[in-house]
């Protein structure tokens, strides 16, 4: 261990020089000596690839080989390891990683989309060649959650993970709660501030969180990555008024990714949740991310930190680089890819739990009786009922919560309720999660 | 990586079969297959040592070699790795670890006292022989904080760590707050429940937290372990009434370990703190532990989990075993022991921050003027002042908070105030930490 200071440098190539790529180069430069102490050798950036060569990124690239084509760079025999920061599940990112592995190079990537869709296949190919694919930066930015689950909790069976996996959504929900403004308004601000993309679909529709959840679930449970089975709902349907009701009922509204081993298989879902204000995750606001793991021996462990940004993401990329430079290797998803145990996806319809439902109803006698009958017919038991204001003949908001029931029954009840004459808008439902 | 399934087993010996030792054996048995998948080889317990052979620990030890003397066990050439769970900075624990290293064996230990006092020396000896000394279980039980700091944040310079490092104290403080009972009362209950030892000194006087802090600081800052420089105060002086005032002032009372790089060196201290209710650590109650790290690239990262108990501690021990079984090695404190950079201890007197002071004073004219004068004479500026009730001629509690000032000035002011005729009890002071 202390004898390897004179080991050859690790020569790396960086594909993609956006915020994160530039952050990685800056970190490697700023902490070069510290990093060498920690891994016993230098980490040298020998090549980079990005779309625009001329752009000023505040870093000196004069000594580094420039590639127009990241795939050509990935094939460069002078390179030991490729850092893939292009993004996207297909195209150049996928080709770059594939070429790196084919030509015998380790890969470090922040690309959750690629891993969510092709992770198991990539892991198999890399492991067959004795290569490492590391991806701490793909989930929850600066939080060392992959390492925490895969190595820190390696002696445990994890039965559940849940987390705030998308900082953009958490920022929007936090702003909606604290300012009372509605989704569209806050989103526009978030875009102006750079917290949300011009096309916010991946974030606000829950896809980004679902990519991350699928990767986390694989690491937590030792199962193949199964993005296709994730139930996904975004935050567009959360209304400003839901925060008032949530507060009154003792809840916070969070977009969570939840993965759980159940008797029927593995549940994976991303959707807005009502969580008790006392849940540790309820206090995680703004652009912060958080992950909770429930493990059989360690019990509950919570990790909180910044989920995005140049510094935190670069920190995660460099942690992976240091691991590889020191020769620390771990199977991609904790257990060797050819031993990942296939799990039956547990369908959303079998989710058990309680529900928050918000309705706009005409304020007239008999309405509540009709709603209650629809619930009773599906064996859904109501816990609370709130009607705000009283305006005979007008539409008023009504909120109810249920006791634990099955999603399928709840969906049938909601279909019946939505079709009632006195219900003037599609019912809005938010699942309650009692952590 | 995927080729090493047929590697020879890792033969381990366990010294100490108390709660944690038995927990480790149970975990290794329960998850044997999972562990083999994760590290590519079996982990076999070949020898154990404990004081009483006959005791029923709920584990079958018939196939395992029994040693009366852990030091003799540590010298057994059939053993690859010694797990030291005896405890204590001297005596058999120290001798067992020394013998293990002398005879070429890796060491996994949960012994914070040993590491706090002899950690740097042990690391130097082990590293000189290419051996690993791993100690995830020594700090914060089931939270993978050593791994998180040493590997997960390896690309960062950490400027500060603070944490709830002793579950017994956190349990007592939480009970005091929620029930309004006083220290002695709650301590007696905690002892009956097994949350506190018959001799609670190590816990309630802050020594255990200080051991852990010294180890954490070394890992966080890359400095030699320096337990002797930790300023230590326990929780015996915290009164039931302080929780009421804290609540009124927007604070929670927590026993924290705080280590910080300052301009003058490294500050290490354990003492009760007033922390804002909004601080993430304020919500960590009961026997839970938490650690916050402030890193230059990752920014703030928080880890929360169970700090003690058979399961969580065994989880940490086994994570270390899996690392070593896989051949993953890391310098003991993150950088090689012979490169740890000595740091000047920053004396407690130079701590800057604000203060909460509680006094019992005779309720008569001029008292506040005398107190205020003592503060003014030391350039300590008062922020708030609260007098509860009004009983002319009687002793009444008075609480004040200060603006930021230097500890030395505050101590001088308190000495003057304590000597005033009208102050009938020694002043109680709790430092305010604004995280």
Image: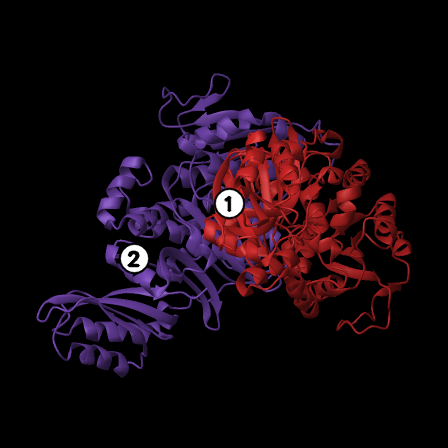
Chain colours: A purple, B red
Q: Position of residue A179 (x, y in %)?
A: 28, 48
Q: Residue at x 39, y 60 (%)?
A: A269
| Front residue of A44 and B208 | B208
Dot 2 corresponds to which residue?
A243
- Chain of residue at mark 2: A
Q: Does residue A105 appear anywhere in the picture?
A: no
Residue furthest toward the top? A62
Among the two numbered marks 1 and 2 on one chain, the one whose residue lies closer to the N terminus: 1
Q: Is residue B218 left or right of residue A420?
A: right
Q: Quadrant of the N terminus of chain A?
A: top right
| Front residue of A327 and B394 | B394
Give me the disc on residue B341.
Answer: none
Q: Are marks 1 and 2 in contact (CB under 8 Å)?
A: no
Is the residue B418 above or below the residue B15 in the image?
above
| Front residue of A86 and B119 | B119
Q: Is residue B91 left or right of residue A20?
A: right
Q: Position of residue A327 (x, y in %)?
A: 65, 39
Is the residue A244 above or below the residue A133 in the image?
below
Q: Residue at x 62, y 40 (%)?
A: B417
Report, in whole angstroms, how far the alpha carbon at label 1 lies from the one at label 2: 28 Å
- Chain of residue at mark 1: A
Badge 1 local density, few (<14 within 10 Å), some, or many (20+)?
many
Q: Does residue A313 appear anywhere in the picture?
A: yes
Q: Position of residue A197 (x, y in %)?
A: 30, 40
Instruction: Please tell me if label 1 and label 2 are on a single chain.
Output: yes
| Front residue of B282 and B305 | B282
Q: Position of residue B312 (x, y in %)?
A: 64, 60
Dot 1 corresponds to which residue?
A143
Badge 2 local density, few (<14 within 10 Å), some, or many (20+)?
many
Q: Is residue B166 left or right of residue B49?
A: left
Element type where label 2 sits in the image? helix
């Amino acid at each position: 261990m202390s004898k390897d200071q004179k080991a050859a440098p690790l020569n790396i190539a960086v594909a993609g020089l956006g915020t994160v790529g530039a952050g990685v180069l800056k970190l490697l430069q700023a902490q070069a000596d510290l990093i060498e102490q920690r891994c016993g050798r230098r980490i040298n950036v020998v090549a980079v690839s990005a779309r625009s060569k001329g752009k000023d990124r505040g870093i000196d690239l004069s000594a580094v080989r420039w590639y127009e084509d990241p795939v050509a760079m990935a094939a460069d025999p002078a390179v030991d390891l490729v850092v893939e920061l292009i993004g996207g599940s297909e195209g150049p990112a996928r080709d770059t990683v594939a070429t790196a592995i084919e030509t015998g190079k380790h890969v470090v990537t922040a690309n959750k989309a690629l891993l969510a869709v092709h992770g198991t296949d990539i892991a198999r190919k890399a492991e067959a060649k004795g290569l490492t694919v590391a991806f701490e930066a793909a989930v929850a930015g600066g939080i060392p959650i992959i390492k925490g689950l895969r190595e820190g909790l390696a002696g445990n069976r994890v039965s559940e993970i849940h987390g705030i996996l998308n900082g953009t959504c958490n920022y929007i929900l936090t702003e909606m709660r604290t300012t009372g403004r509605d989704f569209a308004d806050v989103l526009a601000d978030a875009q102006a501030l750079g917290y949300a993309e011009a096309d916010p679909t991946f974030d606000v529709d829950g896809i980004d969180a679902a990519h991350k959840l699928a990767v986390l679930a694989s690491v937590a449970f030792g199962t193949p990555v199964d993005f296709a089975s994730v139930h996904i709902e975004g935050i567009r349907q959360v209304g400003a008024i839901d925060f008032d009701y949530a507060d009154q009922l003792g809840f916070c509204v969070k977009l969570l990714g939840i993965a759980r081993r159940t008797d029927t298989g593995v549940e994976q879902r991303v959707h807005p949740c009502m969580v008790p204000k006392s849940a540790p995750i309820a206090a995680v606001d703004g652009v912060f991310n958080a992950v909770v793991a429930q493990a059989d021996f360690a019990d509950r462990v919570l990790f909180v930190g910044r989920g995005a940004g140049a510094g935190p993401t670069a920190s995660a990329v460099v942690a992976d680089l240091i691991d590889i430079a020191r020769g620390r290797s771990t199977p991609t998803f904790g257990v060797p890819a050819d031993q990942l145990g296939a799990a039956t996806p547990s369908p959303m319809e079998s989710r058990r739990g309680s529900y928050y439902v918000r309705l706009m109803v005409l304020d007239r006698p008999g309405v509540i009786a009709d709603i209650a009958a629809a619930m009773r017919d599906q064996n859904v038991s109501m816990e609370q009922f709130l009607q705000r204001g009283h305006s005979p003949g007008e539409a008023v908001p009504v909120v109810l919560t249920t006791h634990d029931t099955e999603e399928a029954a709840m969906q049938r009840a909601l279909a019946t309720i939505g079709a009632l004459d006195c219900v003037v808008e599609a019912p809005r439902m938010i699942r309650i999660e009692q952590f």
